[in-house]
Amino acid sequence: MGFGNIGLLIGMALGVVPIIIHLINRRRAKLRRFAAIEFLLMSDKRLARRLKLKQILVLALRVLLVMALAFALAKPYIEPDVATVGELSEPGAVALVIDDSASMQATDEGGDSRLERAVARARQLIESGGTRTSFAIIAMGHPARLLTPGLTYDHAVATRALEQLRPSGRGADLEGALAEAGRVLSESGERERRLEVLSDLAAHAWKPLPTGWGWVPVSTFAREPLDVEARQGTIVPNLAVVDVAAGEYGAPDDKGASSLEVTATLANYGTSEAGTTAELRLGPTVVAEVVTLAAGASRQVVFKLSVSGGTTQGQVSIAASKENRLDADDTFYFTVGARRSLQTLIVNGSPQTTGWLDELYFLRAALAATAPGETPIAVKVVQVSELTSARVDASDVVVLANVGNLTKEQTLMLEHFVERGGGVFITAGDQWVGGSGEGDEKADKLGGTGSTVSAIGAVNKAYGKLLPFPVREVKSVGKVGDPRALLASLSFANVKFEHPIFQIFDGLDDASLFKAHVYTHVLVDTEGRPEATVLASLTGGIPALIEAPIGRGRVVFLTTTIDRDWADLALRTSFPPLVQRICAYLARALDRTSGAGFSVGDEAHVPVPEGRGPLVLLRPDGGETPLDAVEDSAAGAASQATTVYVGAPDIAGHWAVMRAGERERAVSFAVNVDRRESDLRPASEGVLSEVSGQLTRDNGILPTMDAGHEGADEVGTAEAERGRTVLWPWILAGLFLLFGSEAWLLVRGT
């Protein structure tokens, strides 16, 4: 039960006033002896008892009158139960979000999968809908997809959309699915908008929306567990191969064979110890080992074998068992011999004709100096005007080096790139304060002038949500190389060593990173972006390196420069491994330790094989699809692309890109089930309630009326109260009955 004005409930305390008056009147009454009256009272004691009862009833009615009046003024109402969809035969719009991620392939003890139960439940809901109930079907697996042409009243169309759902290795994309549902429901003219999520409610997928709910509030939100275990919050047992790392060791022998070490990481997500057999298949070689896994623990299994030269496809699998309820994550595919370059597009915001003054002078050298065994980084440099969607789509990482301005189209293009899983590395510089000067001379011009403040505002507007935190101002303590400013300079004082970027510096107290001097940096406003994380801070807790997720991708922001204008970081020996790991982290290369690996549903960019002729994509199921490589328009139509976009692989296994008829030169890459799906633990009720509150809470957004439209406030109030059972009008009507009852008792008592 809720209240429109809960503060007025304090008025119910006035119910004691009639009681006080009654007690006061009793205290003031004086006893007057009168023989005749006493005789009459003694002769009719039953009448006296009736009079006393009427007095008590009148007192009770007066107390109820006062309390009921205050209770009615508080406007009580009863909220609908958000755990049920309601009566679907009534007119309304219903968005059915069906979780088709990998965890939905988990089976119960009877052998039925959660996805099968979800589809069956969705059919029941569609069949129970009336002719004026429209449905939209949304698949929750990454990337979220709308399977119907919006909301449809044709229930046959909605039912056919369910037939598109198949078991997959996709990760869950709750945020994207809810965004699709919000869009279609906001376009509906129906008063009742219901959102039903059929999911296993796995904790890895269910988190509050980081930017809140930007659509019309839904009337009813239901998230329905699909089995008894999910309803009870029971941990479902599961074993998984969560990672495989393959690397050569030692020199090849006389026959060209190499010694290979394959390290497989196995995990037990159950609550009891479990045993299994780990099997490595690499070409014709098969190696197996029996493994025992403690409850809730992981363990590494190392295989050492000899392989011939060339690219080799391999896999590590575990045996099925009763402790293993999800089969989709029992096999991990990997490649040997394929070294996938990280395609890095660098946008030079301050190009200079003098080489050592150029913004990218140190960065280009640092990215080219990858250590043996590390993933090589292929660099493409462009200016801001050359930043196009074709170049961005062919890249894993985009570096915005001292870029002071972006067009609206470029910003939206980069936001979409990150949302799909790309990475953006942003560095500050003199272009952020509206200058184009060279080197240290810019330090004298910083300090909060009107032009500087205006330039910072332009940077915040241009970058939008690409910036993890908005920039507040630029702060300078002096020039690089000035001995007088050395003592006032800042240094890296606090670093998250557990983060993949900084793990290599853990335990290295004498690393040159911590000896770098920062003379100029930007200050940021850390309020309002709880999802952003400060990875490294300067002296005084000033953020230096910040990360923020956007959709499936990541943004990393360095608050100083990558050249020598604002700091001497670029002159330190720690600079090359630092920027290399930033790029590798943004490209998720630090997540993929097994060659050219991707997850199902990720957008993939694969190196183009040598030779000429049309490109063909080989699927694990034997299918072949023609491909078009992205050409570099700046270099001419005849130039060949270095990578090819192969879309979002939809099944796990070994894929390959080859020239037509040249299978021996094919570039192989592995695609695996999203390993976050292996953890089947359910989300807490607190998280589920918070998501429910975000979707149903009145946020002032109206379905059919623009802001400022006449009568918008009245419509907004009606939208907020829709679906509630209002009680206060009935209570006011009951007051009249109370008044009548009191009058009747008083008349009967005379």
Image (cartoon, grey):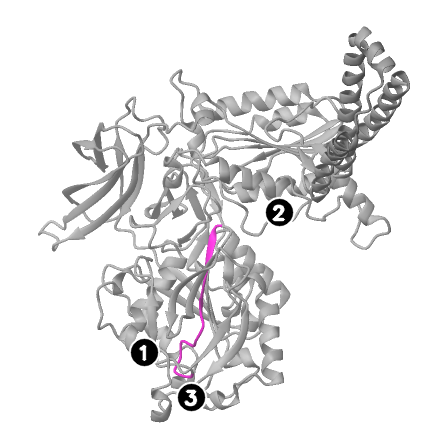
Disc 2 secondary structure class: loop
- Above or below for 486 versus 369: below
Residue furthest out toward the left: 254
Residue 213's tag is: 2
Above or below 436: residue 174: above
* Image location (x, y in percent) of residue 500: 32, 57
The quadrant in which the C terminus is found is: top right
From the viewer's side, name the closer residue of 622 and 740.
740
Q: Residue at x 22, y 67 (%)?
A: 508
Q: Number of numbered discs present?
A: 3
Secondary structure found at label 3: loop
Q: Residue 516, labelled with which disc?
A: 1
Please state which amino acid type lies under the numbered disc 1: Ala
Is 486 in front, or is 563? 486
Taking the image as shown, residue 213 lies to the left or right of residue 650, namely right
Image side of residue 59 versus residue 230, left or right: right
Q: Quadrant of residue 21?
A: top right
Badge 3 amino acid: Gly
Question: At 85% across and 10% down in the image, what residue appears?
Answer: 40
Q: CA distance from mark 3 to mark 2?
A: 45 Å
Please name whichever residue, 83 or 364, is drawn nearer the observer in this view of the structure: 83
| Numbered circle sitting on residue 478 | 3
Span highlighted in magenta in the image: 552-565
- Crowdedness near tag 1: few (<14), some (14–19) or many (≥20) residues, C-alpha within 10 Å: many
Judge the density around disc 3: few (<14), some (14-19), many (≥20) Cα neighbours within 10 Å. Answer: many
Among the two numbered marks 1 and 2 on one chain, the one whose residue lies closer to the N terminus: 2
